[in-house]
C-alpha cells in the first residue's frame, strides 16, 4: 500500500514540476515575440521619420525651383508662362507648330535653342539635379476633332520637340546626356483645356506645350506606403 501511495505521490510531484516549467517556457517565448514586435515598430518609426525629413527637403526644393523658374522666365521676351504651383513652363503651340501640324516650324529651333539651356541651367544645377526624377514634355490640344486624334497630335508634337533636343542638330551637346536620362513625352489631348479671363473655354490657350518636372517625392511616398502596409 505504501508503495502504491509513494508512486502516486512521486507522479503528482513530477507533474507539479513539469507544468510550472512549461508555463515559464511559454511566458519566455511570448516575451521574446513582444520584444521583437516592439523592436520592429521602433525601426519602422525611425524609417518613416527619416522619409518624412527627406520629403520635407524635397518640398523645399520644389518651392525653390518654382521661384527660380518664375524669376528667370516670368515676363521674359520668350513669351512663356510659369505655373506658380507646379513650375510648369507653358507656351502656345503657335510658337512651335502650325495649326493641326506636328512638324516644328523653321523658326522654332531658335526658340528651343534659347529656352532649353536656360531651363536646364536651373533644373539641373547642383542642389536640384539629384531630386529631379523626370523632365516631361507634354502636349495639349483644343477640342477640334476626336479625343484620339488629338491624343496622337499632342503626342507627336511633344515627340518632335524631344527628337530635336536629342538630335545631332541641337547645338548644346553637353546637356543631351542629362536629357536622355530624364526626358519623357506625354499627351493630354484636350483633357486639360484652359479658360480665358472670363472663365470661358479658350481653344487658343488650350493649344500648348508644357515643360514639366517631376521630383522624387512620389517614390518616397510609395516606399512609405509600402512600409506602413507591412
Image (cartoon, rainbow, N blue to C red):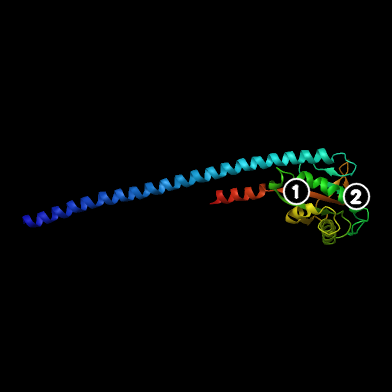
**Relative image position of residue 197 (x, y in whole percent):** 88, 41
Q: Are marks 2 and 1 in contact (CB under 8 Å)?
A: no
**Relative image position of residue 179 (x, y in whole percent):** 76, 54
**Relative image position of residue 167 (x, y in whole percent):** 83, 59
Where disc 2 sits, the SS reads helix
Q: Residue at x 26, y 49 (%)?
A: 20
| Left or right side of 93 for 120 | left
Asked where in the image residue 53 lies, by quadrant, the reply is top right
| Left or right side of 58 for 155 | right
Q: Which mark is residue 104?
A: none
Instruction: Please report whichever mark, 2 or 1, sits nearer to the chain's N-terminal start.
Output: 2
Q: Which residue is mark 2?
A: 204
Mark 1, Cα crowd under 10 Å, few <14 / some 14-19 / many 20+, is: many
Q: Which residue is mark 1?
A: 213
Where disc 1 sits, the SS reads strand
Can the viewer see residue 59 in this picture? Answer: yes
Q: Residue at x 66, y 49 (%)?
A: 218
Q: Residue at x 49, y 45 (%)?
A: 41
Asked where in the image residue 121 lies, by quadrant, the reply is top right
Mark 2, Cα crowd under 10 Å, few <14 / some 14-19 / many 20+, is: some
Q: Nearer the viewer, residue 3 or 138?
A: 138
**Relative image position of residue 39 (x, y in whole percent):** 46, 45
Q: Residue furthest front?
A: 174
Q: Nearer the viewer, residue 64 or 219?
A: 64
Q: CA distance from mark 2 to mark 1?
A: 24 Å
Amino acid at each position: 500500500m505504501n508503495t502504491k501511495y509513494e508512486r502516486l505521490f512521486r507522479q503528482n510531484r513530477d507533474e507539479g514540476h513539469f507544468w510550472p516549467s512549461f508555463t515559464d517556457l511559454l511566458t519566455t517565448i511570448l516575451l521574446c515575440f513582444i520584444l521583437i514586435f516592439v523592436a520592429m515598430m521602433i525601426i519602422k518609426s525611425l524609417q518613416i521619420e527619416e522619409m518624412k525629413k527627406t520629403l520635407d527637403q524635397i518640398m523645399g526644393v520644389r518651392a525653390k525651383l518654382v521661384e527660380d523658374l518664375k524669376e528667370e522666365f516670368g515676363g521674359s521676351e520668350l513669351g512663356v508662362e510659369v505655373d506658380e504651383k507646379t513650375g510648369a513652363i507653358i507656351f502656345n503651340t503657335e510658337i512651335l507648330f502650325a495649326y493641326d501640324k506636328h512638324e516644328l516650324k523653321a523658326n522654332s529651333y531658335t526658340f528651343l535653342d534659347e529656352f532649353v539651356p536656360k531651363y536646364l541651367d536651373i533644373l539641373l544645377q547642383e542642389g536640384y539635379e539629384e531630386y529631379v526624377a523626370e523632365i516631361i514634355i507634354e502636349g495639349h490640344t483644343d477640342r477640334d476633332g476626336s479625343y484620339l486624334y488629338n491624343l496622337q497630335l499632342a503626342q507627336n508634337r511633344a515627340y518632335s520637340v524631344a527628337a530635336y533636343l536629342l538630335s545631332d542638330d541641337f547645338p548644346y551637346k553637353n546637356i543631351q546626356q542629362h536629357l536622355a536620362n530624364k526626358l519623357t513625352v506625354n499627351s493630354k489631348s484636350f483633357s486639360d483645356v484652359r479658360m480665358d479671363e472670363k472663365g470661358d473655354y479658350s481653344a487658343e490657350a488650350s493649344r500648348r506645350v508644357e515643360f514639366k518636372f517631376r521630383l522624387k517625392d512620389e517614390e518616397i511616398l510609395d516606399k512609405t506606403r509600402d512600409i506602413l502596409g507591412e
